[in-house]
Amino acid sequence: MFESPTLQTLTDYNIWIAMPAIALAFGTMFLLVIDVFLPTNRKHWTPLLALAGIVVSFVINLLTYSPEQSTTFAGMFVADAFTGFLNIVVLITAFISVLLSTDYLRRTETAHGEYYIMLLLSATGAMFMVGANDLIIIFIGLELLSIPLYVLAAFRVTRTEERGAPYVLKSEESGMKYFILGAFSSAFLVYGSALIFGATGTTNLREIFAAVGPILESTTENSGALLLLIGAALTLVGLGFKVAAVPFHMWTPDVYEGSPTPITAYMSVAAKVGGFAALFRLMIVGLSGFSLNEGVDPAAWQSAIQVIAALTLILGNFVALSQTNIKRMLAYSSIAHAGYILMAVAAVGSAGLTPNIVNTAAQAGLVYLLAYAFTNLGAFAVVLALENKDGTGTELSDFNGLYNSRPMLALAMAVFMFSLTGIPLTAGFMGKWLVFSAAVQAGLIPLAIIGVLTSVISAFYYVRVIVNMFLLTDDAGSPATGETAGVRYAVYASMAGVLIVGIAVPFVTNLVSMVSLV
Amino acid sequence: MENAGLLTTAVLFLPLVGLTVLLFLNGKTQVENIKWTTFGFTILTFLASLVMWANFDTSVAGLQMVHQWEWLNIQVGGNTITSTYYVGVDGLSMLLVLLTTFIMPIAVLASFSMHVLEERGRQKLYYGFLLLLEWAMLGVFMIQDLIIFYVFWEVTLVPMYFLIGIWGAERRVYAAVKFFLYTMAGSILMLIAILYVANVTGTFLLPEIIAQVQANPNIWNEWSGAASASNVTGALLFFGFFVAFAIKVPIFPFHSWLPDAHVQAPTTGSVILAGVLLKMGTYGLVRFNLSMFPEQSVQYAGFIALLGVIGIIYGAWVSYAQTDVKKLVAYTSISHLGFVVVGIFALNSQGIQGATLQMVNHGISTGGLFLIVGIMYERYHTKAMDAYGGIWRIAPAFGAVALIVSLSSMGLPGLNGFIGEFTILLGSLGSNYLGFFFTLFATLGVIMAAVYILYMFQHVFMGELKVPHGEDAGTFSLNLKWNEVAVLIPIIVLIFWIGVQPGGFFDIMSASTNELVSHVETAHTEVMDANPVETNAEFAYVGETVVTSDAAE
């Protein structure tokens, strides 16, 4: 197992299947070099080149998209429909985030080339997490995803002349908070991985899968069951932090509020995609030994996921009710949505499920992530359009009468809010339907009922935004100073995505039906 | 037959085509074009639905003019759950489709002279929402696939929410949000029930689910899967659907959103709400609760009919106490729909046929009443009953029309309301599950209806002439606009038509309702036979005789 790679194994490395991620990494490096040599009056090429890099990676991903599962790098990286699908989500997220960033950075006078480089690096990290088939790769991907995000969260530096200003830019604070807590959670993940390695003797998820069953069924005292249990719990903490699941969510509202808005948009999706990809791989491929064995109770950590999902749904939705700042509201809403996706993860954890149900649950989670990506990016794009140069303009009251001043923006925001609520004909409904369906099939009726009831709660605060925009007709409406061409494209692209996923359902379900993890 | 199916799809999607056309018109400069395009498409939809009616075969009990297209497959535990675009109509759907396509052009035409539209503008959005609403409502009545039904069901919320919220009266925001959240809370539990049903049966397709229920009426309680059933599962599922529909109807304890929504909604909003949207609830009860859960329907028939009777009396009583004309009419809806609920849960042919006809009647009469109130509101700018009086003196023809609509709502013999209510009372009297007392108390409702309707009519149309503030009593006249006259004519025609010649309408639905009743009876008898311990000899005996008497008909 630990033999040094021979020439033979080296030629087995099929780099092509990891090409989307590798291409993006190369693109990033290329951009790093180019940006240095770009003259000042040509700096606006950097985002264009970044977009080009994303497109190249996207095309390669479409070319390599295959339902066949194949591994490379000695089984550490796996490419299947799951990888391909989530790569698409990550790349779309990165693309829209870059669109959102260009004018925003110019407006806030923070335009630096390294911003885009870090954004792409972070996306590369997410893509490696998505294809990870090994605890080590999960960790490396997670760090590659997170470290640029720490920097980006703090990117809106308060310049000296602004220090005495009446407003406070919270960007540095949010970057610091995110970094300290994020580093802490990474440590949990590493420690957990080490314990799992200790119990099973391998870091490869497939091999862990094979080892888990015998360990748990063995009756000898030192079988490693306890190690496995603690290890699983610690990795759950680490990944729970990334996806902002309760009780590991504390950082979310502060960081979302303080970060530059395009980064909030990016982070709210990409970090979740990465985290959930790892959770799915770890729970289904790695640690699901229990649930697929007939007649054995579901593992303790899998029941824990049900509890976490319920808590996340309840806390996220209820606290979002009382928010007055849209960025904080969307932060709590993103916590709540993590809860819905966790329902899909929890659905995997019931005893004696057939592989078909397990795969259905994974597919439901993927569709939800795609729906959530389009919707959340769109919502943040509208928020960004309303945000003033000094970071104000993100209160809920700033949306009053938006339909009067910017009808298209208001309509788009209404679509996003309905999608987050889960009203049919939008992507959000598709996601919720499939996730609830997965939960019902797995027999988690109480969790499903909590899910629908909290959806009703969520309607309160999402509908409030629509009320402010459409029904408060006396207000003149925000001038939406941030609505520039790039933002407008981002809004329209997201809206198209939301409606396509919501209406042209077979298109998405066909894409996702190839996903099979077990 | 395939062409007939395409016809159904055409009726369903015509409003959406209209909406697409509307998108290309300029909301500021082409307001007239927008109005007439919308009206044209609703009329076109109406004509197309008349063609459907002409092609409708009244001797067929099941669905006809079916059109289907496989929509998506989801792998579930080795089975494939297929959601299918599956439209078709049976007697019940046909009538409600006709009602929808009939009410919509009236609603559009009535909007032409609405003051609030001039004042708040956004006319393109308004007419767009009307078309979207028509599409969604038609979908609810035509779709036979549970999940797509749910999609259409929820989509109706969005345009109605905006209609109330943007173009409503003073407290419109409150009413709109209450409407949205209340109805959504009910229907989302139905989603879980739908998913569970699909999980048990392996399909979302209603005809297939009904076939499985027919094969094994106890299917819900006997299923063993990941979420194994217990002996209350069937009841829980039944109530999962029931609550969603009960809120929409609204059945007595779930009614509090209705007065708010009606009073705050613009005239057209009220017309559509009373005319069609509430019928979605009663339609759902017949289409889903009765056919998928026959045994539970029998079991809880008495309880639900009791709620219906409470609604009849409570609605009438509260109605009488109102000082706001529109609120008065709103509460009459609760009373009238109580009749429909009693009729449905009489679980016999007369009851369900009467209920179905009463759905149509209520749509026409109450829709008409809201139109009349709306016309007066345009002149008086108030809904307080005290502000009105003696309108008959200046507009006797208008007064006569209002009198006919009021009497129809009251259930005067010779007009449409009488036929529906009478048949329902007949059904509840002959029902195996309800009894004399249900009929007795329901009949009280008819008498009370006379009280509140005549009270309103007397206050508004009789006595001293009262004129709007700032108008001169000598010169004041209603000056009815052409479109206001035009919308009332078809309503009066239908009131008399159904009142005098109801046979044609009963013919449409009789085959379907008879089949439904025998389905419920058979399922009930089978469950009773399967559980001899719980068998109630009287029930089984009476159930059998009813089946044979139906066959004799």
Image (cartoon, coloured by chain):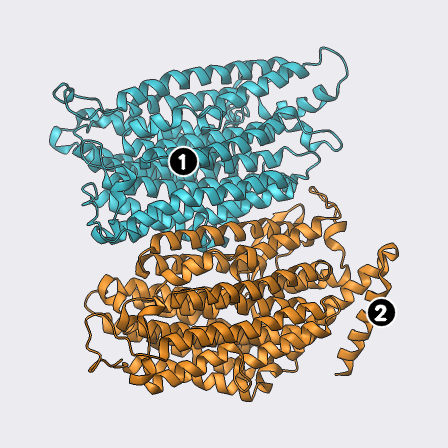
Chain A colour? cyan
Q: Percent from the top left, x then y, of residue A458?
A: 44, 42
Whether residue A61 is visible to the viewer of this picture, yes or no, is yes
**Residue shown at 39% from the left, 55% from the top:** B175
Relative placement, left or right, of A98 versus A63 is left
Helix, strand or loop at mark 1: helix
Which numbered disc, 1 or 2, marks the residue closer to the eye? 2
In screen coordinates, is A307 left or right of B231? left
- Amino acid beneath label 1: Ala
- Look at the image and give the colour of chain B: orange
Against B314, residue A378 (above or below) is: above
Q: Residues within 10 Å of mark 1 (few under 14, many from 20)?
A: many
Q: Which mark is residue A320?
A: 1
Kindly identify which chain the residue marked by label 2 belongs to: B
Mark 2: few/some/many CA within 10 Å (<14, 14-19, 20+): few
Q: Position of residue B251 (x, y in %)?
A: 56, 60
Q: Which residue is mark 2?
A: B541
| Residue closer to the observer: A333 or A39 | A333
Q: Pick whichever, A299 or A444, lies toward us.
A: A444
